[in-house]
Amino acid sequence: MRSRWLVGFVMAGVVALAGCSKSADVTLYEPGVYKGPVDPLVEKQRSPQQQEALLARFNQVQTDR
């Protein structure tokens, strides 16, 4: 009887610990280098017109600070 409890307790522990496992997939990124899918905003950010528009919007919001 005692061995059944022990076996049951061990089995429950194994099942509980199996649910806590996590895959060890690690993705290493280089700082400052975007390697994701193509982002259309990246090209848009390079244009001087977009930079001027962003600066104008920033200045509108930050005037009270």
Image (cartoon, rainbow, N blue to C red):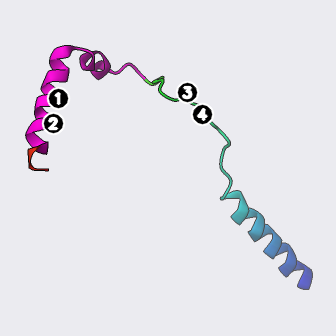
Q: Quadrant of residue 60?
A: top left
Specify whether 64 is left or right of 12.
left
Residue 58 is marked as 2
Measure the alpha-carbon separation of dots 3 and 1: 27 Å
Q: Quadrant of residue 37?
A: top left
The residue under the point 47% across, 27% down is 32
Tally of numbered tags: 4
Q: Which residue is mark 4?
A: 27
Q: Position of residue 2 (x, y in %)?
A: 90, 85
The amino acid type found where label 4 is placed reads: Thr
For residue 27, side relative to residue 59 (left or right): right
* Quarter the N terminus occupies: bottom right
* Observer-nearest of 64 and 53: 64
**First in sequence: mark 4 or mark 1?**
4
Foreground label between 4 and 1: 1
60 or 20, nearer to the observer: 60
Measured Cα–Cα span from mark 1 to mark 2: 6 Å
Per the image, the residue denoted by label 3 is 30
Q: Residues within 10 Å of mark 2 (few under 14, many from 20)?
A: few
Residue 39 appears at what percent x and percent y? 34, 21
Please name the residue shown 55% across and 27% down the image. 30
Residue 40 shown left or right of residue 32 in the figure? left
Query: What segment is highlighted magenta in the picture?
Result: 37-62
As measured in the structure, the alpha-carbon distance from the residue carrying label 3 to the one carrying label 2 is 29 Å
